[in-house]
Image: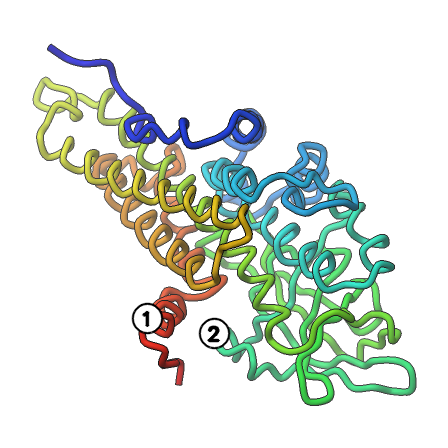
């Protein structure tokens, strides 16, 4: 006698760990993704183009841009609610969640946390509404995992700063109105708020990607970019500035990657129920059920970890190495779920008629941005041993 089908996370009962307001936010974002993103995203991925400006305004109206920040037009939600929103956004596509993460957790957070009151008033309300788009310039062509080696320089010239250098793999770069750029300046690292219409600033888009195709990825070129003295972020010096922002973005990925994994698993469940092989549903075979059970187990464990980290963050007790635990585990398991789900779909799994291969390709990028798996392993290793093994 068969029992009623359970959803993967329903089997774990995780909804009972989420407050009513958080569920309402999650469900609102899920409806937006179902209505606005799912009908279009395969086409955006195939063409390598996305209506990012339109989507930014829609996401601003939805209230998810900088939603976990207080004031300046931001919603001021819990960190857990922000994580749940990231999960629903990435169930649509990692590129969509990247747009929101870079806007809110990198560019907006940098200004909110480290900026002057004038910088906050000028940019944050417009960024929260999606009227203005931001990007975050840290990674360089030769310096990703070792940002302290960056070659971008800021030199004083009278009361001004002059920036020269290049940044690479910058989400939102070509459509941004403002860039938060990190540079070597007077023996330390400083952040600068750079309007993208400043002479000497350009952001050519990176093409020919096979991952994150429904996302704008760019190079930033700074050629004698002259900025006034008040363009510098006044409240931070050194690598702690950009790393604090990365920690915010990594937290969103802890949840977001599970959205991609859940979408793959649900696609495999639906396909295996409809697909008949040897006169039986594919879902009726032991090998298929074993795969579905293992994927569900890892998804549920990842969700429990994400919710635990969310509560720690809401209590102000989340440490950066704990974020590394979540990012390392959940992205790694999400990729494994995407690949396993693809085997259930067979040849159909490689087409854009189903989301599985799109998610798998996107997750290959998520695995290495905001800190590669190796970097997070070393962060965890340092926490365990007290020894830094980065060099």
Q: Is residue 104 left or right of residue 197?
A: left
Relative height, residue 232 to residue 354 (above, below):
below
Q: Which residue is mark 2?
A: 145
The image quadrant of residue 238 is bottom right
The image shows residue 192, relative to residue 272, as above or below, that is below
From this viewpoint, is residue 15 visible? yes
Does residue 350 appear to the left or right of 320 in the view shown?
left
Q: Which residue is mark 1?
A: 384
Please state, as top left, top right, bottom left or bottom right, where the N terminus lies in the image: top left
Q: Earlier in the sequence, mark 2 or mark 1?
A: 2
Residue 113's place in the image compared with 285, above or below, is: below
Number of residues whose C-alpha sits closer than 10 Å to that of mark 2, classed few (under 14), some (14–19) or many (20 or more): some
Q: Residue at x 50, y 29 (%)?
A: 19
The picture places residue 274, in percent across and down from the top left corner, at 24, 20
**Picture residue at 54% right of the left edge, 31% below the top:** 22
| Residue 189 on image: x %, y % | 66, 80
Relative to 297, does residue 219 appear above or below in the rendering? below
Count of all numbered marks drawn on residues in the image: 2
Q: CA distance from mark 2 to mark 1?
A: 20 Å
Q: Nearer the viewer, residue 239 or 204?
A: 239
Q: Are marks 2 and 1 in contact (CB under 8 Å)?
A: no
């Amino acid at each position: 006698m068969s029992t009623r089908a359970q959803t993967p996370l329903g089997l774990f009962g995780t909804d009972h760990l989420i407050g009513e307001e958080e569920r309402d936010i999650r469900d609102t974002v899920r409806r937006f993704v179902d209505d606005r993103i799912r009908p279009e995203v395969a086409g955006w991925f195939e063409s390598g183009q996305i209506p990012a400006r339109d989507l930014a305004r829609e996401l601003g109206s939805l209230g998810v841009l900088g939603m976990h920040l207080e004031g300046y037009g931001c919603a001021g939600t819990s960190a857990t609610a922000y994580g749940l929103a990231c999960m629903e956004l990435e169930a649509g596509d990692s590129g969509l969640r990247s747009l929101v993460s870079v806007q809110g957790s990198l560019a907006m957070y940098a200004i909110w946390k480290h900026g002057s009151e004038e910088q906050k008033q000028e940019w944050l309300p417009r960024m929260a509404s999606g009227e203005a788009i931001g990007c975050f310039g840290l990674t360089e062509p030769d310096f990703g995992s070792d940002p302290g080696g960056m070659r971008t320089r800021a030199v004083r010239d009278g009361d001004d700063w002059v920036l020269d250098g290049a940044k690479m793999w910058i989400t939102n770069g070509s459509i941004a109105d403002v860039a938060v750029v990190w540079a070597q300046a007077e023996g330390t690292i400083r952040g600068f708020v750079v309007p993208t219409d400043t002479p000497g600033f350009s952001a050519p888009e990176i093409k020919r990607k096979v991952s994150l195709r429904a996302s704008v990825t760019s190079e930033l070129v700074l050629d004698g970019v002259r900025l006034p003295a008040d363009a510098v972020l006044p409240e931070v010096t050194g690598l702690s500035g950009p790393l604090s922002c990365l920690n915010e973005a990594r937290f969103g990925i802890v949840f977001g990657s599970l959205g991609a994994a859940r979408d793959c698993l649900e696609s495999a469940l639906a396909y295996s129920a409809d697909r008949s092989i040897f006169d039986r549903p594919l879902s009726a075979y032991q090998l298929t059920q074993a795969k579905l059970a293992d994927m569900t187990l890892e998804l549920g464990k990842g969700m429990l970890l994400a919710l635990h980290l969310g509560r720690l963050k809401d209590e102000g007790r989340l440490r950066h190495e704990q974020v590394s635990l979540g990012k390392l585990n959940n992205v790694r398991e999400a990729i494994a779920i995407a690949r396993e789900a693809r085997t259930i779909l067979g040849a159909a799994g490689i087409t854009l008629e189903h989301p599985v291969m799109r998610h798998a390709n996107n997750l290959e990028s998520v695995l290495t941005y905001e800190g590669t798996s190796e970097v997070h392993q070393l962060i965890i290793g340092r926490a365990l041993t007290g020894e830094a093994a980065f060099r």
